[in-house]
Each structure stands twice: as C-alpha cells, then as structure tokens.
Image (cartoon, rainbow, N blue to C red):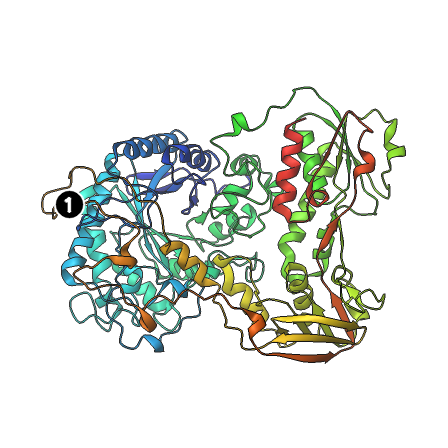
Amino acid sequence: MKYEHLLSPLKIGNVTLKNRILGSKCVSSDNQEPMLSGPFYEHLARNGAAWVCVGVGAYPDCEGNYSKMAPCHMDDPKAMEDYRGIVERIHKHGSLASASLMAVEPQNVNISDTPNWDEIPMTGDYSANLFNKPGISAERLEGMIQDFVHASVELQKLGFDGVTIYASYRGGILACSLSPLLNQRTDKYGGPTMADRATLTLEVFRRIKEACGQDFLIEMQISATEEGGYTQEDWLDYCQLCEGLVDIFQIRGWDGSFTHVNSHNLVKENPYNLQFAEAFKKRGIKAVVSPVGGFRDPDLIEKFIAEGKTDCVSVARALICDEHYIDKIQAGDGEDLTPCLLCNACHGSFCAVNPYAGYHHMLDRMFTPSGRKKNVAIVGGGPAGLRAALFAVEQGHTVTVYEASDKLGGQLKFADHVSFKWNLKDYKDWMVREVMKSGATVLLNTPATPELLRDKGYDVIIAAMGSTAKRIPVQGADDPKVWLAEDVFGREAELGHKVVVIGGGDTGREAALYLAKAGHETVMVTRGDVMLFDDPHSKRATELDYENEPNFSYIDNAKTVAVTPNSVTLDVTLNVPKYDGDFGMMLMMMGDHDEGPEVMPDSRPEGFPPHAAPFDPHAEFADAEIKDGPAPEGPGGPPPMPEPVDKSKLPHETRVIDCDTVVISGGRKSVDASAFEGIAPEFCVIGDNVLPKNIKFCTQSAFAAVMQL
C-alpha cells in the first residue's frame, strides 16, 4: 500500500481511529441550521476524516445565559435531534464525532485583571479580539468548569465520542490561563510556573473524564508557543502534566497565520507546526499529537508519520477542496488531488476550487443536466476554460479546448515566476495535467474564430476568453513606455532599479512585492488605505512578507494625477486615521444578531444554579451587568467604531515621485465574446468573460455552465 502509515488505524485506549487523518474544526455554510449541516459533516467523514470536529450550539451557562459564539441553543429539542442525526451520519462511515466546546466560556471576562495590558505584545491576527476584559471571579470560574462538564455529558448522550477544547491564540479563558502574561491570578489557578497555571485546564479535563469516562476522548486545540509568553519547553511540560487526561493534542501556531497558513509562510516540505509535533514525540509524551496547518500532500504526510515526527495530522481545507480526497489516496493517486489555494475561502465551507463544497445539502436540486452527451468547444485555456473542460469530461461530454497561445493556464502563467505564488502555480499545473489526462482534445496556438468553429458540429460553445488589462484614465498613462503589471513577471530584468507601481489591489500588490524581491527599489501607490492582505485568518503572514522586504514601501491615500515613463505625480491626503483590518472580524463576533430561542426547562445536573430569565445571547458586551463587573469601555475595552472620514476636508499635498520605471495595475475588462453567439445551438460565457474576478468565480461559473448542459 502506497500510503501505509497514513491509512493505518490508531488506537487510543479502547478507542480506534480508522486512519491518521483528523478533521480539524470547520463549519458548514448552514451552521445556523444544524439539520442542513449533516451532509457537510458526513462528507468530511466519507472523504477520509477519522475524527470529525463538529461546531455545536450553546447550552445555557451557570447563570442561564447563552454564548454569542453559538449558532443555536443546545437545549432546544429540535437542535438535539439534529445533532444526534449528524453524529449518526459521521458514524456511518466509521468515523468518530467530536463536539467543539468553543461556546462554553463567557466572552465578557478573561482569566484575570491585567494591570500591565499595554506592555503585552499584540501583533497577531486575532489581537483585536483580545482586549483588556475584567478578570473572572473564582465563583464564576467554578461555574464555568461545571458548564464544560455539563456540555460534555449532554453531548455524550447525543452520541458524540469526545470533545474538542479550544485553547489557542490566547482566544479565550482556558488559552489565556496558560499565559504568564495574561494569567496574573494569585489564587490556585495562577502562579509563576506552567504547573501553577495548568491547574484550571487540568481541573476541566479531570472532571470531564470523571463524568464521561476514559473512553470519551478529549482533544485539546492548543498553541505550542506564545508570543512573549510561554515557550516550547513550557508547552511540552504542560503536555506531560495532561497525560491520562488529554487524548489528542491538536497543535496550532501562536497566531492564526501559523495555522491558517498561506503561500507566504508555508514551506510545503516542512509545515511550521510539524516542529512542535516532532519535539512532542521526542519528549515521549503519552498522548496523540496531531499538528494542523498546511498538511495536504499525502506523500509528505506519509513520510512525516513514517519518520516518527507525528502520529497523525489535522486537516480541514484538504478535505474540502477535493471531493474525492480519500478515494485518490486509497488508489495511490495522490498527485491527482486538487491543490488547495490556501485562500481560506472555506471559512464558511465554500471553496475556490471545489464547487460542491458548501452545497452538499442541496446538490440534488441545484442543477438539472439534460443527460444527453454533447460536443463541446471551449474557447480559452485559462482557469475557467480548463475547469469547464474537466467538469464537462466528468459529465461524459466530448470536449475540445482552443488556446491561442502555446501554453495553457491563462493569467495563472504569471505564477511560474513568483516564489510566493507557488500555490497558484501548483493549481495551474494540476489543471493542465488533469486536462491532458482527461481525454479532452487540446489545440494550442489555435486562436478560435466564429469561422473556425462554425462547421465543426459543436452542440455547445463555452467562451472562456478571459480579460485584458486596463490603463488608468490619467494623463500619460497610455504611454507605451509605461508598463502594465501583468507584463513584468519574468521580465523584471528589463525594468529600471527604482519602480513605482500604481494600484494596491491583488495584481498591483503582488507585482510590487515580486519586483522588490527581485532587487528593485519599489514603491506601491494606492488611492485608499493600504491593505496588504485579503484574508483575516492569515493576515499577519502576508503582512510580514511585505514588512520584511527592505525594497518595498507604499504610499496610500494617494490619487495619481499624472504619469510619465520616469515619474508619477500624486495628490496625497494627509492625516487619514488608520483602520485596523482585524477590527472588522471583532465586530462580526460582537455585532447585532437576532434573539435566539427561549430558554428551555432546566434539565441540568444537581448543583447548577437555576436558569435566569430568557437572555439575549449576543448582548453581553452591550448591556450585561454581571457580578464580575460590566465589560470595560475606552482604552481598556474593545476599540471604538471607526468614524467615517471625509477626506476632502483633510489636508492634501502634491508629490512627484521620480523613478526609472512606472508600472500600472488599473483593473481588467472582459473580452467581448459576442461574436460566438449563434455559432452552436448552445452558447455560454464563464469566468472573466462574464466579470473579471477570481479563481473561485472561474470555478463556480464553469461548473454552473457545464451542469446545465
């Protein structure tokens, strides 16, 4: 067997995992409706996950309140029945079901008061979510421990095989309890050593095991280090303290960027969190270790397990981006797996490269193919055209791809030259390889024309001709000596040393960083606030790549007024307040929501305080007066909502930037494909031919077109 170690069972006490692929927590697009989430979680189990972590709702806490982190109330009989059904779906495929307990901890308090808040490093992706909340009282802390136990007991009754406890990124009370920076308690739950600070989590684990039994597994999702806080050795000491209590350690980085890795910080052959798993194994800790973050390639995972660097790996994106992940691995065809773009579009379960993801509950009514095999011509061999070819062949159609150039790949061919876009190169190479293996006819150096296609007997013509770059409507921008951003890749030696790149979108940013890494002194100019990242889940990884490049700089809030081949004139708005991109994520977590269902009758074990009156689970920060004190406001509380800025009222200045080369990234416009209309009985337009957007749109539009043939 090619993947002998990866596919081998793993025994934890009396419990057996069917293989070494663990599903890390991810949620369905219909997480608000648990019944509709069933097909998504069942897919993860069928697609190879031996351990499926399910996002569940909230039980009322010891004060009768519901967490705002939860999609539903778990004491609602309908929710209970829905989750029981989800577990049955997972078990049907020989997988185990774990429930994420992220919705247990109160959100308006932290492990302790923090007098020296301003001295604590706060550079991570989720720093805006972590602000100076008041410390939780000892009484409330005891109630929280009971809440963890109660949730575990009730979830076990629903059929769950274990729970996953969140303790990473300093993202909650349990995570912060391990931090020497944030846990400043002077009672039994605090202290100078990791053993002191471990007391709270050990108590939680011990009581869950006592209530649910040793075979009810506990997975701990934990950061292996903390910025400025606990070290790897501290963490290893902690893991040893947890022996016999924690069954699976899912290792995450200190920050989201080192878990939700992207092409800026993932070394494929050596994912960041593997180092911690290896240290864990060398220490001989009696538990299962499972790192997460960029583990997809089955050949590498097989190697890591065979070499004893880890017991298994935790994945989410790999299971989502390929509909047949486990089938291909079991067949030994790892090279055929759809590459993950690492774009994190699947935070919400939709995927840029798998159009089925997020729609498993409605696939049977999404499309109604005619069932007739058709002769299909695809005009264009870019990401939309290639995916259309693969989908069409999969549906049994005869496919011919017309490509005007000598290579397939379209705009993604630029990634051949850009080290930090290796993810797009992998995806492009995979598409080309799969199309060439598919049986489709590929005609290179063949510009398609209506005359060429008219008498070929095609039933369908799919236009995937893409888009062309636009210049900006500024004096001098149409000078042929002014470069377009798409033309610089692979030709950087032809540019002068000092370069100005106009445009702060994806293409402009990437062209600027590419040229800077190639040794050019590069200034990027953008009209609005600069944003060096697209995905808040891996924000810091991308920012660091730009910040650590000495040849890169930017000028934001700068309108380009005039261009020559050797200068750019700008109208720069001064004193524009800076907006933290993390703030939007925090507002989403704290924002207004519809009120949840009424509190159900009390069914909790003896010893819990009675339920309070029905409570708005999303109003904790707004108006909750709790015995630990109200949520703080001002400098110690959440950052204030940014006020709209009228830039016309701010001071401006004119700047002239002298340079050797000017590069423009002014957006794109669709190629006109209307000439092909009427050439065949059916005609459709996909990808950038419809609207210049992204790979996700190319994939989805290609899929939708083919599935309606």
| Disc 1 crowd, CA 10 A, few/some/many (<14, 14-19, 20+) | some
| Residue at x-position 69% and y-position 61% | 418
Residue 550, image x, y percentages: 62, 77
Q: Given the current orientation, which residue lies at the most extreme right position?
A: 451
Residue 108, image x, y percentages: 27, 60
Residue 200, image x, y percentages: 21, 60
Q: In the displayed structure, does residue 704 sit left or right of residue 118?
A: right
Q: Given the current orientation, which residue lies at the most extreme front position?
A: 649
Task: Out of 594 and 514, give the one closest to the viewer.
Answer: 594
Q: In the rendered image of this protein, does residue 624 appear above or below residue 640?
A: above
| Residue at x-position 69% and y-position 64% | 511
| Residue at x-position 64% and y-position 68% | 526
The residue singled out by tag 1 in the image is 611
| Residue at x-position 56% and y-position 40% | 322
Looking at the rendered structure, the number of numbered marks drawn on it comes to 1
Q: In the rendered image of this protein, does residue 698 appear above or below residue 517?
A: above
Task: Out of 359 and 194, give the one closest to the viewer.
Answer: 359
User: Which quadrant of the view contains residue 506?
Assistant: bottom right
Task: Out of 237 and 163, give the one closest to the viewer.
Answer: 163
Dot 1: element: loop
Residue 197, image x, y percentages: 24, 66
User: Which quadrant of the view contains residue 484?
Assistant: bottom right
